[in-house]
Amino acid sequence: MIKLTRRQEDIMKILWESDKPLIASEIEKKQDDLNINTVQATLRALMKKNAIEVADIVYSGTVLSRSYRPIISRDQVITEYDQVVSKVLNDKNLIAHYVDEINDLAAITELEKIIKEKRKKLEK
């Protein structure tokens, strides 16, 4: 399993969804909040993690550029979200702290309902 940051996950999603290898400038255009410097830095980090590879050297206009493709699947990835959720779910004291902070009877009732449903599933 490979751990990815949110930005690395963003780039990997773009590469996974593409039907062909992409160059950095093509990746940048796929998502509004990306800039070329971020894309290039993220691609270098993903190369170090062996998550992507250079597929080919292609012309981008008159400039030679590397095109990238993923070499790992989505199933081989642990995202920051997965890491946080795992940590929270495994830390009963943290959950108890947040439950203790709830001062809304409706919210507590909803949590009880969720817990009862989960208990039923686990008991089967």
Image (tube, grey):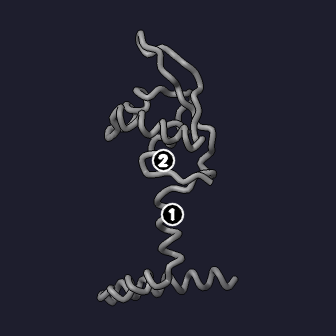
Instruction: For the N terminus, give its image quadrant.
Output: bottom right
Q: How far apart are marks 2 and 1 (CA)?
A: 13 Å
User: Where does residue 10 sit, x and y in percent of width and height?
Assistant: 44, 45
Q: Residues within 10 Å of mark 1 (few under 14, many from 20)?
A: few
Q: Residue at x 36, y 83 (%)?
A: 107
Residue at 50% across / 79% down in the picture? 91
Give the x, y percent position of residue 24: 43, 29
Foreground residue among 93 and 99: 93
Which residue: 43% across, 13% down?
63
> What amino acid does circle 1 point to?
Gln
Q: In this view, does 117 lie above or below 61?
A: below
> Which residue type carries mark 2?
Glu
Tell me whether the residue at label 2 lies in contact with that at label 1, contact meaning CB atoms closer than 8 angstroms: no
Which quadrant of the figure contains the C terminus?
A: bottom right
70 with respect to 22 (left or right)? right
- Which mark is first along the chain, 1 or 2? 2
Q: Quadrant of residue 105?
A: bottom left
Write down the residue under mark 2. 9
* Residue 111 locus on image (x, y percent): 44, 83
Q: Residue 68: which quarter of the image? A: top right
Rendered location of residue 11, percent (x, y): 46, 40
Residue 13 against residue 119 in the figure, above or below: above
Residue at (42% x, 83% y) in the render: 110
Residue behind mark 1:
83
Vertically, is 58 above or below 39?
A: above
Q: In this view, does 83 lie to the left or right of 61?
A: right
Q: Which residue lies furthest to the front in this view?
A: 48
